[in-house]
Amino acid sequence: MPLKTYWLEHAWLGTHVEPGVALDVTDDGRISALRTGAESPPPGAEVLRGLTVPGLANAHSHAFHRALRSTVQVGSGTFWTWRDFMYKVAQNLTPDSYFALARAVYAEMALAGITAVGEFHYVHHAPGGVPYADPNAMGEALIAAAAEAGIRVTLLDTAYLSAGFGEAPNPHQLRFSDGTADAWAERVSALKPREHALIGAAIHSVRAVPAGQLATVAAWASERRAPLHVHLSEQTAENDACLAAHGRTPTQLLADHGVLGPRTTGVHNTHLTDGDIALLGSTTTGTCMCPTTERDLADGIGPAVRLQRAGSPLSLGSDSHAVIDLLEEARAMELNERLSSRTRGHWTANALLTAATADGHAALGWSEAGRLEAGALADFTTIALDSVRTAGALPRLGAETAVFAASAADVRHTVVGGRHIVRDGSHTLVEDVPTTLAHTIAALRG
């Protein structure tokens, strides 16, 4: 017997929008049945009016970057000056303050329809690089924060060992470094998955992990069949430095050391050669595009169309959290490509929603999420079709409305594991999310 039945006024089923769908959820948090043609709510059903889609997957997050919003918009600067300010915020984090901030940030994500996040986590130790009594105190804080905010997390514990191609970490980066990849692997092996949390791995970049230690991180992930993510060719300066140090592009260097593959995701993949694109596609290495961050930092527009055509699955992330809005990320990927190519229609709305849902979850190791079908995890979100942004469109064009008109502000409901986390636009677990964000960010600034 179902624990609960939801009646979806309109549901996006991957290829089309279906009116009147009844969805049964069992006590293990999965969809047990999905019935179309339900013109009215069954007795006792929870009614979700609007367009219900699978929960959105934020495949790339640095939770503490949320404290940079607006502050880093003053004046101009570059990625590198932005990074200097980011270091200052990172220095103020403690396990307690990071838990408080991340709980609020993950609650903001739930309000935006996000049901799973990939947390690219590299602030591991106390200032100066001294381990906490629990060497994984910071990662545990993030896992606990996601639980309290009601969303799933893949903790992508990040190896960050060098300031750049063998240089010792600078004073800010000592918090990030375990010294060697073997020490990183020993520490991260103590982290354990939970019902709402998976443990994955990340290579911060080819700058931050010496070439001879890349294989150690890749082997750790491979042995556990865990997701492995890496910042890849985000900056042309990184490419130039890699060529100078190794005579190879970052993508070629990763390939040489066994990093590429179907459980690996390159984040950004902005400045690639034709050969890089072929390598990523032939190994089915994924690509996580973060358009709002990439344009905020003036990084450039990555070759997403060519990557997907070559065989690289696409996912989406909010990265630095200039905004937290996966619908905007999906829209921006298409609109950026239109500006770059001066042609329209590179992806359908269905394809963009797939990147934001099923393919994003797959990149994070949640292969049983991201779809509205029997057996899948009961993670979904409902977008209003009657707001000032979405009113007037035909319901059968709900996917187009969601991607090209709606925003995170139009999310009305978020359900994770069958549990209502956001109801009628309000978070059910974290009271007054805006005030909580304001207080936690102010505390970090001192």
Image (tube, rainbow, N blue to C red):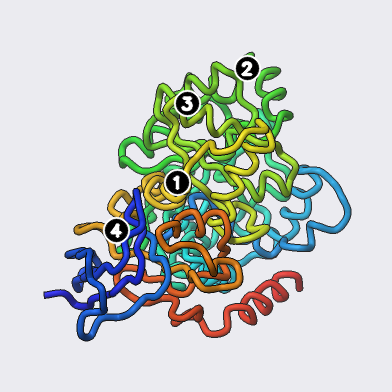
Q: Is residue 217 above or below residue 44?
A: above
Q: Is residue 270 above or below residue 356?
A: above
Give the CA distance from mark 4 to mark 1: 15 Å
Please give the label number shown on residue 165.
none
Please tell me in which quadrant of the rendered image residue 215 appears.
top left
Residue behind mark 1: 355
Outermost residue, left direction?
1
- Residue drawn at 30 percent across, 63 percent down: 195
| Structural distance between the alpha carbons of marks 4 and 3 | 29 Å
> What amino acid is found at the position of numbered circle 2 in the picture?
His
Q: Badge 3, how many Cα within 10 Å: few under 14, some, many 20+? A: many
Question: Could you tell whether 160 is left or right of 286 in the image?
Answer: right
Question: Along the polypeptide, which appears first: circle 1 or circle 2?
Answer: 2
Q: Amino acid type of disc 3?
A: Leu
Secondary structure category for the residue under label 3: helix
Label 3 vs label 1: CA separation?
17 Å
Relative placement, left or right, of 174 versus 307 is right
| Residue 105 in picture, x, y percent from top left | 57, 68
Name the residue carrying label 2. 246
Label 4: which residue? 372
> Are the residues at dot 4 and dot 3 in contact (C-beta closer than 8 Å)?
no
Q: Is residue 122 something that shows in the picture?
A: no
- Most foreground residue, 356 or 154: 356
Give the Cα distance between marks 2 and 4.
46 Å
The Cα–Cα distance between marks 1 and 2, rounded to whole angstroms, is 33 Å
Judged left or right of residue 164, residue 74 is right
